[in-house]
Image (cartoon, rainbow, N blue to C red):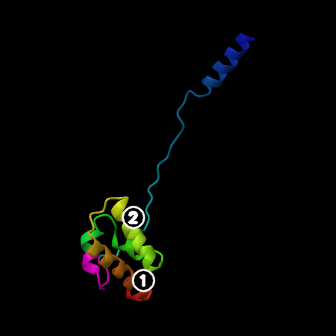
Amino acid sequence: MRAAATLILALALAGCDSAPKVVFADASLTLPDEPVELPEGPGRDAVLENCTACHSPSTMLQQPKVSKEKWESIVGKMKKLYKAPVDDAAAAQVVDYMMHVQSQPEASR
């Protein structure tokens, strides 16, 4: 019985004597345009000074519309959990900016 198992294993391994053929093809993809600048609005300077080190403009501009309280919670989480060095005055300005930007029509962003 042991000899039969050894023979089966040897035959199985014999079939693995060549490497699989792999063909790499060139591929390309087109990424969406990245806005270079954030639109004007109250608190924009606070956002540029405190948020753009970690967040791209497109990331900030594509956030779902939420309440002011939710933005305060999000900014608070950035400060507390992620240790973002944002003082309270700047945090309030960031919230105001996000509320302003999200109140604008998509075309004006």
Helix or strand or loop: what does disc 2 sit on?
helix
Residue placed most toward the observer, 29 or 96: 96
Tell me where residue 107 appears, x and y as whole percent.
42, 88
Residue 84: percent from left, percent from top: 30, 62
- Residue at (32%, 64%) from the top-left corner? 54
> Which residue in the protein does label 2 denote?
77
Q: Is residue 57 visible?
A: yes
Q: Above or below — where is 101 with respect to 71?
A: below
How far apart marks 2 and 1 lie (CA) works out to: 20 Å
Q: Main secondary structure of the magenta part?
A: loop
Which residue in the structure is indicated by mark 1? 102
Amino acid identity at mark 1:
Gln
Label 1: how many residues lie within 10 Å, few (<14), some (14-19) or many (20+)? some
Along the line of sight, which residue is nearer the eye, 27 or 34?
Answer: 34
Q: Which residues are magenta?
A: 37-47
Indicate the quadrant containing the C terminus: top left, top right, bottom left or bottom right: bottom left
At label 2, the amino acid type is Lys
Residue at 65% across / 24% down in the picture? Answer: 12
For the N terminus, the image quarter is: top right
